[in-house]
Image: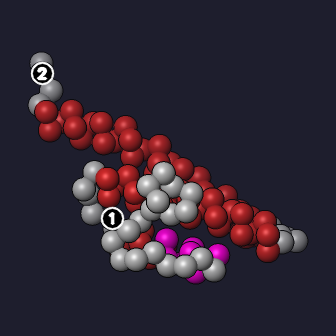
Amino acid sequence: MTVAPGGRQASQCRLVLAPLLGAVDDARRAEKERQRGRGVTALELAKVRANTLRALEDYASALDAMAWPVPRNLLTQIKMHRALLSLPQRPAGTTAGPGSRDG
């Protein structure tokens, strides 16, 4: 049985996106756990939020590189994290962040 080119491409996309989405889930979980902790400092919270932002931006950049739409909810979360970290907002249509390979 042969795999259709579209099926192979979809499989490759899943191989690229799955670890990135896993990193987003892990970062979100770590951020929530840290927020629940007592005695968390602003610096510690900023670090976990920056990790979450980096994971969100990496995932969005991968979607964008594949010419797939970036969900509005994902863009909203990126914008919120940038605001929480007092970082400038990216121009519309760009998802790469300061720590990403794209920008």
At which x and y percent is residue 59? Answer: 43, 55
Q: Is residue 47 visible?
A: yes
Nearer the observer, 96 or 41: 96
Horizontal side of 40 relative to 52 (left or right) equals right
Q: Nearer the viewer, residue 37 or 89?
A: 89
**Mark 1 touches mark 2? (CB < 8 Å):** no
> In the rendered view, does 54 fall on the left or right side of 9?
right
Q: Nearer the viewer, residue 85 or 73?
A: 85
Query: Residue pushed farthest front?
Result: 103
Q: Nearer the viewer, mark 1 or mark 2?
A: 1
Mark toward the start of the polypeptide (1 vs 2): 2
Classify residue 96 by image quadrant: bottom left
Residue in the picture at 21% in, 33% down: 8
Residue at point 79% right, 74% down?
Answer: 42
Q: Alpha-carbon neighbours of circle 2 within 10 Å: few (<14), some, or many (≥20)?
A: few
Residue at mark 1: 70
Please tell me whether residue 80 belongs to the stretch shown in magenta.
yes
The residue shown at (30%, 36%) is: 12
Three-letter amino acid code at disc 2?
Answer: Thr
Locate residue 72: give its quadrant: bottom left
Q: Is residue 73 left or right of residue 65?
A: right
Determine the image quadrant of residue 43: bottom right
Residue 91 against residue 56 in the figure, above or below: below
- Amino acid tagged 1: Val
Q: Position of residue 35 (x, y in %)?
A: 73, 70
At 63% from the left edge and 59% from the top edge, which residue is drawn?
A: 51
The secondary structure making up most of the magenta span is helix
SS at badge 1: loop
Range of magenta residues: 78-85
Determine whether 41 is above or below 27 in the image: below
The residue beneath circle 2 is 2
